[in-house]
Image (cartoon, helix red, strand yellow):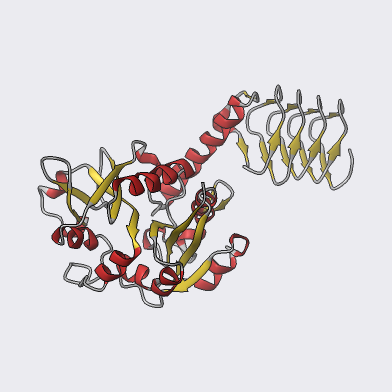
Amino acid sequence: MPQNDVTAVVLAAGKGTRMKSEHAKVLHEIFFAPMIHHVLDSLQSLELGRTVVVTGHQRDQVQGALGRYGVTFVEQDEQHGTGHAVLCAEKEIADGGGGTVLILCGDTPLIRSKTLQDFTAAHRESGAVLSVMTTHLDDPTNYGRIVTDNEGNILCIVEEKDASESARLINEINAGIYCVEAKFLLQALRQVGTDNKQGEVYLTDIVGIAKGDGLPLHRFVCEDAEEVMGVNSRIELAQAHLCLQERRNRELMVSGVTLLNPATTAVEKSVQIGCDTVIHPNVHLGGSCVIGSGCSIGRSAVLKDCQLGDKVTVGPLVYLEGVTLAAGETVPPHLVRYGEEA
């Protein structure tokens, strides 16, 4: 159901130094789209009142890549931490009528819409001023740790660089996704200092402020740790791509499409495929492809923006772009064809 009183704030200002790239981190492609596209796609089904994207590093390129989303942009000219980034959106949060703010990062492309829906619903039901999404990792290195009391209530979040040896043994980590009431959020961020090893305004410090003021907190555990993985390196970029590819291929197989080797099959989200179609290994289907029912797509074929009727057979090692094939047609192996009927 629509959540018009919720404003999403997506943090996308960072450089991503571990990527060792000249490009903005959130514009690196994962499964055929910039990673921030996947984050914004996950928000669309929530029907939020407003989505604000905080840009900074290469802001012109980031904003240019998001034109179709209808989001509001704010700029973080100098990066002074996640808390400072959210404060840059203060006016937009206030203009949204207050309410609830859903905060997440533009480098978490694996988060699912349903998880965000469940998270916002749990926040409402809890009556808390602040809800924190957490998960458990076998190796929590580089993540903030969730410190709780004996009853599982959140006491604070400790960043890795500021964590003691005992805190680093905690395997429950901060997913970097929050639901927080706007009035408390803005008041708390004005109280946050920079007394930490990075000299930054940590968004996580609002947990301690809420706790100190005796305000209710809620801890929401995401059971699938993969969903909240932040992409900070080329290795994690590849891992996220494979995860989205596996999700897409599972959807296709559940819908009645046969994939003979899913690990080598790449089908973009925009592609439609009818039931009983068989996809051979090393196939890539992209763009606006519509594949009918009962088709066979041969090994190592690449199709882009093609329209195939039912029971079409495409041989191996074929490249087709912008081609329309009538029902029952056969394409021989090794054919390359552009923008015309075969």
Which of the 4 quarters of the picture holds residue 285?
A: top right
- Residue drawn at 15 percent across, 46 percent down: 148
- Residue drawn at 54 percent across, 31 percent down: 263
Q: Is residue 43 visible?
A: yes
The answer to which of 245 and 110 lies nearer the viewer is 110
Q: Is residue 317 left or right of residue 155?
A: right
Q: Is residue 82 above or below residue 115?
A: below
Q: Is residue 44 left or right of residue 205?
A: right
The quarter of the image holding the C terminus is top right
Residue 208, horizontal then vertical, whole percent: 17, 59
The answer to which of 92 and 162 lies nearer the viewer is 92
Q: Is residue 164 above or below residue 200?
A: above
The answer to which of 170 and 204 lies nearer the viewer is 204
Total number of numbered discs in the rendering: 0
Q: Is residue 45 above or below residue 267?
A: below
- Residue drawn at 65 percent across, 23 percent down: 256
Q: Is residue 58 visible?
A: no
Residue 178, horizontal then vertical, whole percent: 34, 54
Which of the 4 quarters of the picture holds residue 277?
A: top right
The answer to which of 226 and 130 lies nearer the viewer is 130
Residue 140, horizontal then vertical, whole percent: 25, 45
Residue 279, horizontal then vertical, whole percent: 67, 27
